[in-house]
Image (cartoon, helix red, strand yellow):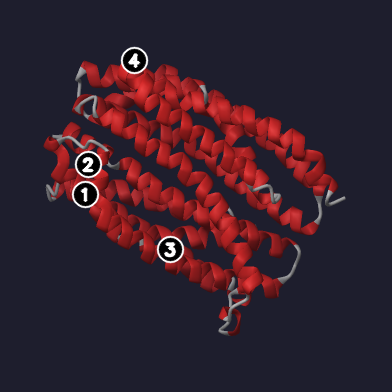
Amino acid sequence: ALPICIAAIGATSTLYALLICLICGFNNGFGIVIARFFGAKDYKKMRQSIAAMIKINGILLAVLMASFLLLLKPLMRVLNTPNDIWNAAYSYIAIIIWGLIAPFTYNMAASFLRAVGNSRTPLYFLILACGGNVLLDFVFVMGFHTGVWGTALATVIAQLFSATLCIGFIRRNYREVLPTREDFASNPKISKEMFTTGFSVGLMMSVFSIGSVILQSAINDLGTTIITAHTSARRLVEMLMQPLSTIGVANSTFISQNWGAGKLDRIRNAMKKVYLMEFAWAVFAMIVGLFFGKVLMVLLTGTGDPNIIANGVMNIRINCFFFFPLGILLALRLAMQAMGSKVAPVVASVIELTMKVLSTYFIIPVFGYVGASFTEPSTWVACMAFLVVAYMLQRKKLFGARC
C-alpha cells in the first residue's frame, strides 16, 4: 500500500537528509573558495582548489559509504524504526547509500558551475532529473511492482543522470579552467582553506540534520500513521523550502565572488534584494500551505485516511507560516560563511540541535505531533535572531577589514 511505502521511506529519510546535508555542505563550502579565486581572477589557485575539491570528495565518499553501511542497522534501531516497515526502510536507505557517488558528483559539479557564475545550468539539469525521478517511480513501482526499493533505485538513476549532464557540460564549456595533472600536486595552504571552509559549512548543515535525525526517533515512536503524515508533509514543505535554500546558496556564491574582487557595495545591495526575494517566496508558500495543503496531502499520500490528512495539513500550515524567518536564516548563515565568518553559523546550528533534542525528550512526549510540528519553526526563529545579532555585531569588522 502507498501509505506503508511512504512510511518506510520516511522512517529513514532523516539519515538520507543527513548524508545530503554533508555532501551539499562540503561542496557549497568548496564553491565559496573557488568563487573567491574566480572573482579575484587568480586562475592558478582556482585550478588548484578544484583539484583539492575532487580529492577531498573522493575521500569523503569512501568514508561516508563505509561508515553508514556498517552502522545502518544500529542507526535504524536508534531511530525506533517500526517492525512492520523495517525491511522496506532498510532496503530503501541501503540502495541510497550504495549510490552516493551520484549526489557527490552532481553537487561537486553544481558548486563549480555556481562558482563561475552559472547557477541556471545545474538547476535545469536538476529539474530534468526530478522529472525523470517521478517518471521512474511510476515505472518501477506501478509498472514493475518493485515496492520501496524501486523508488530508491529511481532516485539513484535520476541523480546519476543530472551528474552526467553537469560533468559533460563542464568538459565542453569550461575546459580552460579545469585542473591539469600539475594542479593535483599537494598545495597545503589551498587544501587547508578548502577543507576548513567545506568542513565549516558541512558541519553547520549536518548539525541541523543530526537534530532532525533525533527528532525523527520521537516521531517514529508515534506510529505508522504519524510517520506517513509527517513524511508526506515534509515532502511538500521541503519542495516549498527549496527556493529559499537556492536563493541562499546562489547569494553565497555571488558574495564570495565579490568578496574576492573587493566589491563590497554589491554585497550590501545583494543582501537587501535577497531579503525581499525570501519574503516574497515566504508569502507564496504560506498561501499554498493555507489554501492547498489538504488537496496536496491527498495527492501525495493517495489515501483518504482523515488522521493522516489532518496531521499532515497541520504540519504544512505551521511550517509555512514561519518561512520568512527561515529564509533570513538560510541567507545569513551562508552569506557569513562566504565572508569568512565561520563560527556564528555553526553556533546557530548547535542552538538548533539543542532545541530539537530538548523537544524530543520533553515536548513531543507531552504534546505529541503538535509539539513535533512546532519544533523546527521554533528553532528557525531562535537561530535567525541569533544570526541577525551576530551579523550586526560583526558587520563593521567584516566590511571594515576589506575597505
Check disc 4: other Cα within 10 Å, few if <14, some if 14-19, many if 20+: few
| Mark-to-mark CA distance, 4 and 3 | 39 Å
User: Residue 311, position in %: x, y?
Assistant: 30, 19
Q: Earlier in the sequence, mark 2 or mark 4?
A: 2
Q: Quadrant of residue 231?
A: top left
- 25 to the left or right of 295: right
Label 2 belongs to which residue? 77
- Which of 83/108 is in front? 83
Q: In percent of the image, x 15 and y 38: which residue is there?
A: 85
| Mark-to-mark CA distance, 3 and 1 | 21 Å
Residue type marked 2:
Arg
Contact (Cβ within 8 Å) of mark 3 with mark 1: no
Residue type marked 1:
Lys
Q: Quadrant of residue 96?
A: bottom left
Label 4 belongs to which residue? 367
| Mark-to-mark CA distance, 1 and 2 | 6 Å
Q: Earlier in the sequence, mark 4 or mark 3?
A: 3
User: Residue 76, position in %: x, y?
Assistant: 24, 43
Residue type marked 3:
Leu
| Of marks 3 and 1, the one in the foreground | 1
Label 3 belongs to which residue? 60
Residue type marked 4:
Phe
Label 1 belongs to which residue? 73
- 189 to the left or right of 206: right
| Mark-to-mark CA distance, 4 and 1 | 29 Å
Quadrant where the image shows the N terminus? top left
